[in-house]
């Protein structure tokens, strides 16, 4: 595995080594010791699988106080994936990172706790799977508006398919329940 640092400290793109032959291919998606050696040490406790249609946008979501590290990958299709630092007091507060995750590029994205995360489906359908470092906690569920212009995220859709909840999320400046930055 190759761990590629991004401009946002803690957000890491994981590029797997994928040996292929006439039978197909093999890919290691998680190896706790290798991740820890790369500075990505979290106990991952829950797996999730999201199936979505083209144009669906889910996010931008986070949990607080039970924040979650997320390790995301696409097993079918292609998504535009984004995360935003929402930790009050962070030197990168409000800054975003985005990339494309697909079944072809097999990239994974490590998103630290204290970052809001979202994705938009580019293919006909997409299956995104991800591991989290804490359990889903409905009472700790938070989010910010996907189209907040201060974030500068170049979403590939103008009128995405949104859940009613996601359509009502506040802009970052008005968001409540943001996690603090732990120095």
Image: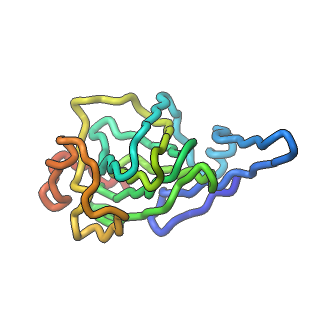
Left or right side of 41 for 29: right
* Outermost right residue: 22
Residue 80 % position (x, y): 44, 58
Left or right side of 174 for 22: right
> With respect to residue 32, does 3 lie above or below?
below
Residue 23 % position (x, y): 84, 39
Which image quadrant for residue 41? top right
Residue 169 % position (x, y): 17, 49
Camera-nearest residue between 144 and 94: 144
Q: Which residue lies at the image location 22% right of the left edge and 55% below the top edge? A: 145
Q: Which residue lies at the image location 23% right of the left edge and 70% below the top edge? A: 150
Left or right side of 45 for 3: right
- Residue 130 in view here: yes
Left or right side of 24 for 118: left
Looking at the rendered image, the quarter that the C terminus falls into is: bottom left
Q: Which residue lies at the image location 34% right of the left edge and 58% below the top edge? A: 85
Residue 64 % position (x, y): 27, 40
Q: Which residue lies at the image location 30% right of the left edge and 71% below the top edge? A: 152
* Outermost front residue: 124
- Residue 91 in view here: no
What scheme was used to colour the molecule? rainbow
> With respect to residue 100, does 140 lie above or below?
above
Camera-nearest residue between 140 and 49: 49
> With respect to residue 86, does 74 lie above or below?
above
Number of numbered markers:
0
């Amino acid at each position: 595995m190759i761990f590629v640092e991004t401009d946002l400290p803690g957000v890491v793109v994981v590029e797997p080594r994928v040996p292929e032959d006439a039978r197909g291919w093999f890919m290691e998606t998680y190896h706790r010791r290798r991740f820890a050696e790369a500075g990505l040490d979290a106990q991952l406790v829950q797996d999730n699988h999201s199936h979505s249609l083209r144009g669906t946008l889910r996010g931008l979501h986070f949990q607080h106080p039970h924040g979650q590290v997320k390790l995301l990958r696409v097993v079918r299709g292609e998504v535009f994936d984004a995360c935003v630092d929402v930790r009050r007091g962070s030197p990168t507060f409000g800054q975003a990172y985005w990339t494309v995750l697909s079944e072809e590029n097999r990239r994974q994205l490590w998103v630290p706790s204290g970052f809001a995360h979202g994705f938009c489906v580019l293919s006909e359908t997409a299956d995104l799977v991800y591991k989290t470092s804490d359990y889903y906690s409905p009472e700790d569920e938070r989010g910010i508006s996907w189209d907040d212009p201060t974030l500068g995220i170049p979403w590939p859709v103008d009128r995405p398919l949104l859940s009613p909840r996601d359509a009502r999320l506040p802009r970052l400046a008005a968001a409540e329940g943001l996690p603090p930055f732990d120095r």
